[in-house]
Amino acid sequence: MLMKDLRFYEFTGVLAPGAVLLFGLMLLFKGVRQALSGDGMELGELGLFLVLAYVAGQLLQGLGNLLEQVYWGRWGGMPTEWVQENKALRCRKQLLSSQQHDLLGAKVVDHLGLQPESSLAAYVPWERIVRQVSAAVEQGAAGEKVQVFNGHYGLHRGIATAFIALLVFALASGHTDWRILVGLALGTLIAGYRMHRFAVHYAKRLFVEFLQLPQPSGEEEAQ
């Protein structure tokens, strides 16, 4: 029943990373393994593991928010911010062509009903515009496909955070097995790489789908 009631994002962004953290702790620490599994994990214990994984995943969300701020701060902001003119050109080119970029400014005015500005950078704070763009896209047929990219971004952000937490626990507890430390470091790098890719894909797909939305009718504009 628990699994059936979970939404896609709750599974990818919360439960799965929490399960990675708990499973890693069970491998690292015998006491945790005995407390969670005993001699063998039965159905009731599996339910407890899922609940604990969900709680651990929620806690990882907070650490993931910090990781997100630090990581994307080095890129001048998250990919959804790269379309602004004050961001590095190398970042903007990963999302939209110059023509698409110009069309996006007009689309923001026409579809969202905002006042025209000299550039996209003039819309401050930009994250509010992104939320409106996301809401508009979600109402269309492509909304669910776009959110899949966001879900996978949350999944890999959570996994990267879980590996970082496990690496800290391993170092703090005096684990000296280099294979464990290297494995956790590699897991962090791979999950971080996937996190980056899905964030870029999400931003690209979000804005492209927004550009494809039909113009609002005169009747809708009047309302």
Image: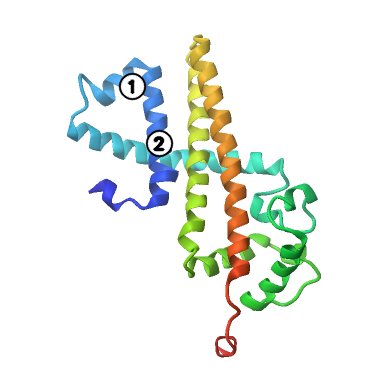
Q: Which amino acid type corresponds to the residue marked 2 in the rendered image?
A: Gly
Front-lying residue, 164 or 190: 190
Image quadrant in which you'd find residue 119: bottom right
User: Does 20 appear above or below 2?
Assistant: above
Q: Which amino acid type corresponds to the residue marked 1 in the rendered image?
A: Val
Q: Which residue is mark 2?
A: 18
Q: Is residue 48 found left or right of 173 in the rendered image? A: left
Q: Residue at x 45, y 60 (%)?
A: 144
Front-lying residue, 8 or 71: 8
- Say what secondary structure mark 2 lies in: helix
- Residue 72 appears in the figure: yes
Q: Residue at x 63, y 65 (%)?
A: 129
The alpha-carbon separation of the residues under discs 2 and 1 comes to: 14 Å
User: Does 85 appear above or below 9?
Assistant: below
Q: Which residue is mark 1?
A: 32
Q: Position of residue 36 (x, y in %)?
A: 28, 26
Front-lying residue, 197 or 112: 197
Q: Is residue 127 found left or right of 171 in the rendered image? A: right
Q: Is residue 88 found left or right of 217 in the rendered image? A: right
Q: Residue at x 56, y 46 (%)?
A: 198
Q: Position of residue 40 (x, y in %)?
A: 20, 22
Q: Position of residue 86 (x, y in %)?
A: 80, 56
Q: What is the basis of the colouring in this image?
A: rainbow
Counting residues from the N terminus, which is met first, the one under dot 2 or under dot 1?
Answer: 2
User: Does 90 appear above or below 39?
Assistant: below
